């Protein structure tokens, strides 16, 4: 196979890599934002629960979570859709990302500051409305660089899916190695693709977030 | 006789280690302007926040227009919507334009339709002479302009009283005038206000009554002229002298 067709063979895995990363990122967002606000604004028992969740999901290797979800929950317990490797991987990464994003947003909430909440309350906004209209938009701006790194991390960690046979970028790289007996080019090609997937977007988000923050005096 | 708009009786606020407000009672009537002043750390902000229902007093009651709002079960959000509050450090919403800042409460608290909220917000900005700056973000405005937007944000909600916690003390000296001028205009229109300020010239002009506050307590209260001519307490006298010396030096 010429290098170009090798490259294109690997590239066919990119949509799956993106699907795993984006879906797990969104699940992480859906988990992380509420967890962060619960951690900051609700009582002690909730704080302890959120902390515990974060500690566990950040402490356990992601591959352990994936195998547990796939073999333990999906195959042994027969719980759908975790009997499919794609979903087991995505969900495991989503849970871990929820823990990371909870920390990112918690830092951002601190960055926005309690004063914005007091100002919102002085207008008669209930806490929930103040969170939605005053805190969340500003937390997103502060969180953007961190969210960019989190996204890059998920792109990279989606490569673990190859162990469970999901046909994504890494798996296709591996197939290429086995069929061509070339142990160098496929990995370079793959590395190049991963850098293209992570670096530009993460850098852009980092710059955008920092600029916006400066512009708004946040 | 005018109605009492806001009142507190035997108000206490005790933090873990500090008693910030000690047994304070005061009353503001409709159209009246009371001006509170006193040393830093004496509990002025704490008192203002208790009166605005932004913190819960430890003891004592706060009444607004005859209704006790320190009882359990009171809808505080509903009450806060009609109490204007202007902060020392301004605290505009960074992510919203001047207009957005003023509109937020109108849209989300009073639930006005878009068009009506826009009209009312624009009117409030016009009142503080900030209409031209409606589409600027707080970071693009000077401190004085920001504080005028802060006043418009409170004003737009049609408050029956505005509480201002040192509205000019975070501003550069040359920007104070535009804010005090805005407040003078409100005073002329008969707006009921509780103002914490150390702008003595301004105080003398607008206040119906001045209150000297120290260590969480009202030390002396009376018409401004009395403070400027012969304050009865020594502490107030010395404090006034220092303030006046400071302002004439500048
Ligand atoms: N949230 C709080 N928790 C604990 N102590 C506070 C808090 N807010 C104010 N204090 C304390 O209460 C006292 C009065 O503060 P404050 O009301 O801000 O005074 P002022 O506005 O007159 O400067 C100060 O000693 C201050 O440190
Ligand atoms: Mg203060």
Image: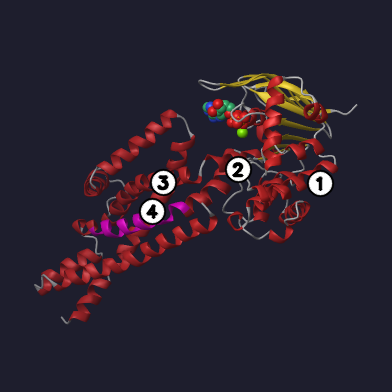
Q: Cβ(mark 4) to ligand 1 < 8 Å?
A: no
Q: Give the spatial CA distance, label 4 vs label 2.
A: 28 Å
Ligand 2 quarter of the rendering: top right
To the question of a shared chain for discs 3 and 1, the answer is no
Looking at the image, residue A134 lies above or below residue B56 = below
Density class for disc 4 (Cα within 10 Å; few <14, some 14-19, many ≥20) is many
Q: Position of residue A155 (x, y in %)?
A: 30, 60
Q: Which residue is mark 3?
A: A32
Q: Which chain does tag 3 point to?
A: A
Span highlighted in magenta in the image: A142-159
Tag 4 secondary structure: helix
Q: Which residue is mark 1?
A: B185
Q: Position of residue A169 (x, y in %)?
A: 25, 66
Select label 3 or label 1 by which is in front: 1
**Residue drawn at 73 percent across, 48 percent down:** B177
Q: Cβ(mark 2) to ligand 2 < 8 Å?
A: no
Looking at the image, residue B244 lies above or below residue B61 = below
Select label 4 or label 1 by which is in front: 1
Density class for disc 1 (Cα within 10 Å; few <14, some 14-19, many ≥20) is some
To the question of a shared chain for discs 3 and 2, the answer is no
To the question of a shared chain for discs 4 and 2, the answer is no
Q: Which mark is residue A146?
A: 4
Q: Single out the residue that lies furthest toward the left.
A: A181
Q: Work out whether residue B247 can be spotted.
A: yes
Q: Nearer the viewer, residue B17 or A21?
A: B17
To the question of a shared chain for discs 1 and 2, the answer is yes
Magenta-colored stretch includes residue A70: no
Q: Which residue is mark 2?
A: B89
Q: Which chain does tag 4 point to?
A: A
Q: Give the spatial CA distance, label 3 vs label 2.
A: 31 Å
């Amino acid at each position: 196979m010429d290098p170009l067709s090798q490259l294109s063979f690997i590239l066919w895995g990119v949509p799956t890599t993106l699907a795993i990363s984006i879906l797990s990122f969104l699940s992480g967002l859906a988990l992380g934002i509420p967890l962060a606000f619960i951690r900051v604004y609700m009582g002690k028992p909730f704080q302890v629960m959120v902390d515990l969740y974060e500690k566990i999901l950040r402490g356990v290797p992601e591959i352990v979570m994936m195998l547990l979800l796939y073999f333990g929950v999906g195959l042994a317990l027969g719980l759908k859709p975790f009997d499919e490797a794609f979903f087991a991987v995505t969900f495991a990464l989503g849970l871990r990302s929820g823990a990371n994003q909870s920390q990112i947003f918690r830092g951002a909430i601190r960055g926005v500051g309690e004063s914005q909440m007091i100002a919102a309350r002085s207008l008669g906004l209930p806490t929930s409305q103040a969170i939605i209209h005053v805190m969340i938009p500003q937390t997103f701006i502060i969180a953007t660089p961190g969210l960019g790194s989190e996204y890059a991390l998920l792109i990279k960690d989606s490569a673990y899916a190859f162990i469970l046979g999901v046909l994504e970028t890494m798996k296709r790289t591996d197939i290429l190695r086995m069929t061509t007996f070339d142990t160098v080019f496929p990995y370079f090609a793959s590395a190049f693709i991963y850098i293209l997937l992570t670096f530009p977007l993460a850098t852009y988000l980092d710059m955008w977030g920092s600029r916006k923050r400066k512009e708004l005096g946040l | 006789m005018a109605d009492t708009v806001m009142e507190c009786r035997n108000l206490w606020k005790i933090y873990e280690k500090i008693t910030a407000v000690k047994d304070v009672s005061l009353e503001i009537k409709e159209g009246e302007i009371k001006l509170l002043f006193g040393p830093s750390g004496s509990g002025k902000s704490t008192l203002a926040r208790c009166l605005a229902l932004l913190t819960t007093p430890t003891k004592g009651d706060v009444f607004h227009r005859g209704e006790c709002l320190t009882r359990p079960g009171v809808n505080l959000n509903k009450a806060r919507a009609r109490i204007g509050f202007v902060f020392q450090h301004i605290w505009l919403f960074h992510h919203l334009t001047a207009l957005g800042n003023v509109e937020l409460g109108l849209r989300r608290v009073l639930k006005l339709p878009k068009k009506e909220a826009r009209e009312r917000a624009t009117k409030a900005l016009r009142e503080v002479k900030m209409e031209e700056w409606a589409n600027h973000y707080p970071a693009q405005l000077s401190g004085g302009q920001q504080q005028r937007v802060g006043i418009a944000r409170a004003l737009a909600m049609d408050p029956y009283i505005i509480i201002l916690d040192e509205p000019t003390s975070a501003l550069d000296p040359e920007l104070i005038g535009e804010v005090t001028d805005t407040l003078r205009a409100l005073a002329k229109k008969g707006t009921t206000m509780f103002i914490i300020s150390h702008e003595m010239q301004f105080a003398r002009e607008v206040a119906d009554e001045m209150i000297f506050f120290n260590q969480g307590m009202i030390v002396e209260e009376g018409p401004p002229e009395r403070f400027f001519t012969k304050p009865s307490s020594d502490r107030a006298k010395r404090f006034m002298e220092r303030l006046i010396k400071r302002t004439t030096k500048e």
